[in-house]
Image (cartoon, rainbow, N blue to C red):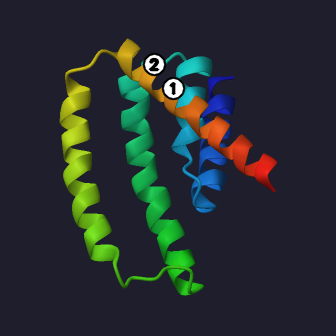
Amino acid sequence: MIYFWYILAGFISGIFGGLGMGGGTLLIPILTIFLGFNQKLSQGINLMSFLVMSIVSIYIHYRNGFIVTKHIFWIILFGSIFSFLGAVAMSFMSSHILKIIFGVFLCVLAVVEFVKVLKK
């Protein structure tokens, strides 16, 4: 039965990751809620799976002309710097605090998307 959850987690995060929406938004809750992993482990698994999924997605999106590389250097540079700082900060936080931060992030994301739909 545990393999069912692994397959489901991979399927869902792969579909959403391929669409460019961030598979970790669903993968992390699946790992923490349904599989009982702690938040730090779930985030680590998400990062490792994201590497592989993003390489495949980048290739397909680039081949289809959906990636413009004009200003990508600055995004990569500052994204890398702040990813490093975020990872260092995370190493000092408890899993409980990370779970709260992630939950708040998901709630804010839901409200923003809901407001966008209402404006249309």
Q: Residue at x 45, y 51 (%)?
A: 50
Q: Quadrant of residue 90?
A: top left
How many C-alpha atoms fall within 10 Å of the one at disc 2: few (<14), some, or many (≥20)?
Answer: few
**In screen coordinates, is 91 left or right of 11?**
left
x%, y% of residue 62? 51, 81
Q: Is disc 2 placed on a helix, strand or loop?
A: helix
Q: Amino acid at mark 1?
A: Val
Q: Residue at x 39, y 13 (%)?
A: 96
**In screen coordinates, is 12 left or right of 66?**
right
Cα distance between the residues tagged 2 and 1: 6 Å
**In screen coordinates, is 105 left or right of 44?**
right
Task: Work out whether 58 lies above or below 78.
Answer: below
Task: Work out whether 117 lies above or below 111.
Answer: below
**Residue contact between numbered discs 2 and 1, judged by CB atoms under 8 Å:** yes
Residue carrying label 2? 100
* Quadrant (top left, top right, bottom left, bottom right) of the N terminus: top right
Front residue of this view, candidates 22 and 101: 101
Front residue of this view, candidates 64 and 78: 78
Task: Work out whether 110 lies above or below 52.
Answer: above
**In screen coordinates, is 40 left or right of 25?**
left
Q: Is disc 1 placed on a helix, strand or loop?
A: helix
x%, y% of residue 101? 43, 25
Task: Work out whether 39 lies above or below 83.
Answer: above
Residue carrying label 1? 104
* Quadrant (top left, top right, bottom left, bottom right) of the C terminus: bottom right
Q: Amino acid at mark 2?
A: Ile
Q: Residue at x 30, y 15 (%)?
A: 94
Q: Residue furthest front?
A: 119
x%, y% of residue 52? 44, 57
Q: Quadrant of residue 107?
A: top right
